[in-house]
Amino acid sequence: MNFSSVLIVTYGRSGSTLLQGLLNSIDGCLIRGENHNFCYGLFKAYEAITNTKNHYDNETKSFEATHPWYGAALLDENRFIEDARKLVLNQLNPDALQLNCIGFKEIRYVDCLTRLGEYLNFLEKLFPNPAFIALTRDHDQVMSSGWWQKRQDAKKTEARLTEFEEYISYYGKNKNNVFHIDYSDMINQTQNLQKMFEFVGVPYNKAAVENVLSIPHSYKTKPEESVTTHTLQVEQVQQPIVQYARIDESPLQNLQTITITVSGVVVLKADSGKDGVLIATDGEHEYPVSWKISSPLIREKFPENPNARYARFRVEHLQITTDRAIDIYFEDELANRYLLFKILLKETI
């Protein structure tokens, strides 16, 4: 492998346990789960040692027993790193397994945004030959989780996620040990997922990846009383005025209700000359669609297209049945409609 350590750097409900599973499918690679960011305490201790050594006149006078900082000059930040590394590796690998790579995933980096750069630099010292894999996910999917809703309001969450992503993107710009992957790359098995395996230095094993993806990860859900489930099938229609469009994956699987919320992205081509609205309809009823919601990740994907800055959409309270599809259109100023998606409900027992 190209690295001796791999750290998954992300936030809650990003799909980090799934990424953990994919990395653990590599022979000789051990990626543990989250640990309440216990290395941050080591970072603070390291900082205290360096601050103590840098305190004025500690270098010479602190050897005197009458000095208030007696012995401060004997503190050794390099020895601390060596000792801390042994401590961390013993905690992660108490059985002393013979490994090619070790690490863990952590979701609490958003709690230390103001010190994130310094903290990542410390982790780069602490872990042997480390790689950082930055994991992101569509913000609507992340914020739909009750885990986030219990902690802060949506605006604060959006701001923190965006700030984290912008910083980690900046941090990794000139580094060859930082790789960015999105949740959608994993579940859709995109080329970027293959590049991640190339990045860590192992061949892409399609069978192993598909096996991991077939296994539920993270917390188990409570059993449902109903034995009938519903799954949405999405058919996308290519239109010449559209540069990029997709429906989010997460809300479309294992549905237990026919009242649904659908979200996604529609980016008109920069030179389309079109403006208008999105409309969702079942043929009898039309549903209001909120469109042109801030989309920072899509903006990064298409930086030259101003339409990518506000490209997300969301439509709630859709009533869908097995015999009636939902169509989502773009309607321009002249009331011309362009079909983008056809959503069908499939029922299984």
Image: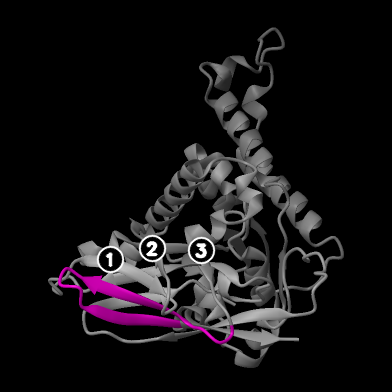
Indicate which disc residue 137 carries. 3
The residue wearing badge 2 is 289
Residue 133 or residue 332, whichever sits in front: 332
Which corner quadrant of the image does residue 241 belong to? bottom left
Left or right of residue 293: residue 37: right
Residue at the image position 73 percent from the left and 75 percent from the top: 216
Instruction: Tell me which amino acid carries mark 2.
Output: Val
Residue at 55% over, 54% down: 143
Q: Residue furthest bottom?
A: 207
Three-letter code for the amino acid on which mark 1 is drawn: Val
Q: Position of residue 166 (x, y in %)?
A: 39, 52
Inspect the magenta stretch and tell me whether residue 37 lies in it.
no
Q: Which of the numbered marks, if any, corresponds to residue 277? A: 1
Identify which residue, 310 or 26, lies in the foreground.
310
Q: Is residue 166 above or below residue 40?
A: below
* Point 27% across, 81% down: residue: 338
Mark 2 and mark 3: Cα distance apart in space: 22 Å
| Boundaries of the magenta span | 322-342
Disc 3 residue crowd, few under 14, some 14–19, many 20+, Cα 10 Å:
many
Decide which of 19, 2 is in the foreground and name it.
Answer: 19
The tag earlier along the polypeptide, 2 or 3, is: 3
The reply, left or right, for residue 207 in relation to residue 121 is right
Task: For mark 1, give the secondary structure.
Answer: strand
> Of the residues under marks 2 and 1, which one precedes in the sequence?
1
User: Does residue 43 appear in the picture of this structure?
Assistant: yes
Residue located farthest toward the right when viewing the structure as drawn: 95
Q: Are marks 2 and 1 in contact (CB under 8 Å)?
A: yes
